[in-house]
Amino acid sequence: MTELSDRDAELVSAHEQERPARRLTGTLRLGVWIVGGLLSAYSLVVVFRPVEALEHRLTFLAVALPLVFLCYRSGISSALRRVRGAAPPAQPSEEARRDVVDRPGVGDWLLAAAALAVLVYPLLDIDAFRDRGSGAALTGLDIAAGLVLTVLLLEAVRRTVGWSLTIICLIFLAYAYFGAYLPIGWTIGHRGFDLAQIVSQLYTGTEGFFGVPMQVAASYIILFTIYGAVLDYSGASKFFIDLSFAAFRKSRAAPGRTVTTAGFLLGTVSGSGVATTVSLGSVAWPVLRRAGYPKEAAGGILASGGIGAILSPPTLGAAAFIIAEYLKVSYLEVLVYATIPTILYYLGIFLAIEIDSRRFGTHAVPVDAPKAGRLLLRFGYHFSSLILIIVLMALDRSAFQSVVIATAIAFALSFLDPEHRMGPKRTAQALAKGTLEVLPVTAVCAAAGIIVGVITQTGLGLNLSAIIVDVAAGNLILTTFMSGVAVMLLGLAVPVTASFIIAAVIIAPALTTLGVTSAEAYMFVFYYAVLSEVSPPTALSAVAAAAITGGNTYKTMMMTWRYTLPAFLVPFAFVLTPNGQALLGQGPIGTVLLMTAVSAVAVAALAMATGGVTGWPERLLATVAAVLLLFLEPVPIVAGLAVLAVAAAVHLIRRRRVPA
């Protein structure tokens, strides 16, 4: 499953927040793939031969940004046709249409050349460039190059993820420049900065374009996309799907559990909620339909399984790498934070699937797949590189070195499968794919540097967090609720990575001001940024799933929300309760295990409350029980268990009365 079908690629393009790339052909496609492969090779080499931070990020962006302009359409001609109400010009054939649309124009080449020039320029004398920036002695050429790069990054973001993030960046730039004109009494007012000061902040150091988000893109993310591409080309995707279908083939809940498990495994390759949903849906929807699942329920299973890919170790979404950098902890520590919430997330989905299998009367579906034991014996080596990443990091290897070594192992093991062995051609394709898949994230991370740089320069982050706390009257519960809503609303407009970065520098400080630890605050923001992909009214993964199943889009969104409900409530537990840190794997092992068990019971209560097989009294009681249990304190836990026992008793009594 190394390539999506044309229809699936169109679905990903239509519903992913990242815009579709051009389908290049011929010599240009070869050239782009060669450059992409070289950038991947460079990224692998610098892991063992480090380059100074600013120089490395400049070099990386100097190659990646021109590729963005060559690989992503401007969309201007299409927009003009829509404004004029004109029909698109007729083409003699589909192939001819693609050839015309997907060939970069003169403007694209000029933008690519300009990007290369303004990023190579500092590299000509990196020490002098850095000194001019730190000493506020920028030349006119420095300022001009910085302004050009700002415009280019805004255009790159517009091409890759749309107008929303572009507009947000423009608002922050205007705020930095015109801040002195704000009313004197406003908390967010500041003295204002001229163009030279803004350019110095964004362009000449590691506080703006080349800050932490860019470091994460040029170090962590590129390495993990290369690793995912090698796994994909070595046949791991096909193995994961086959194994999932082979493992759950007998029970009536097996089809739903199979899809969820396959989504978890595919997430190690994809890293995108929508892409995982679509990749999985093309294979799993026919099975779910034959099992008796309604279109909307099947779509909910597909979307919740897809979004779980971003929430699940060992390859979390891009925002998780930024957490590691912001907290100054190892990536392994972030994986520990995510482990228990991931277990609770999938427990909730499996329980909901079990309930739905009874509600919908689903049944097992015979699938033409080898037995699980045989698959594991033949292709189980695909798990070895995933396990190796964790083992190496536990042995104090850096995340960079761990993933590179795991990539090398996955490459070597591919020769055990003649169909997917990584010969020169497949190796080159995997390296190129690693770079091409990181281009949108690179544009987002570089542009997010505008937001982070302005917030740092103006002190806006502390001011806004203070406003949030004041509006909530210093109440932690209200502040947390407002923070969750704000992050989800932000995530409706911009990609997960961008929404996390913005929220991490504005909203997380509001939580830490009220005594929440940095780890708890960042993980809370992370989960709500990710969950925006399954939150109405956009819910991109659910919309993509509905497009596959043909179900009602709104009903599919609500089914997805029901399957993912524990993921919305558990983050409140580790922010609002003293024992909540145990859900992040922090504290004595006994406390961690006890709080995990209590939370699992709370998730079961939520499944009972939303399952649709109980009456409203049981649902109400189960909801109250779940909330009490998630307080994770002795008295509420005992009360929650008592209420849940009453709910179960009421259900049994009502169930016995039904036949009579």
Image (cartoon, helix red, strand yellow):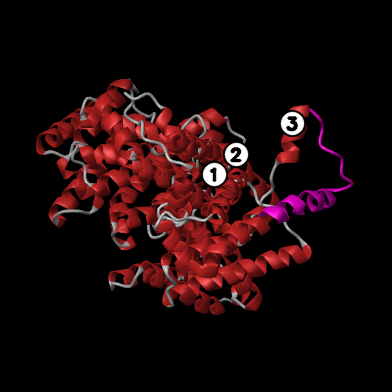
Left or right: 472 as drawn, with respect to 404:
left
Q: Which residue is mark 2?
A: 549
Q: Nearer the viewer, mark 2 or mark 1?
A: 2
Gap between marks 2 and 1, in whole Å?
10 Å
Left or right: 510 as drawn, with respect to 270:
left
Which portion, as a residue range, is magenta? 85-111
Q: Which residue is mark 1?
A: 288
Instruction: Tell me what residue is drawn at x 15 percent, y 54 percent.
Output: 587
Label 2: element kind: helix
Tell me which amino acid carries mark 3: Arg
Q: Are marks 2 and 1 in contact (CB under 8 Å)?
A: yes
Tell me if mark 3 has few (under 14), some (14-19) or many (20+) residues whose alpha carbon lies within 10 angstroms of its own.
few
Q: Residue 602, located in which quarter of the rendered image?
A: top left
Q: Which residue is mark 3?
A: 82
**Looking at the picture, how far across and down is residue 373, in whole percent?**
45, 68
Tell me if mark 1 has few (under 14), some (14-19) or many (20+) residues whose alpha carbon lies within 10 angstroms of its own.
many
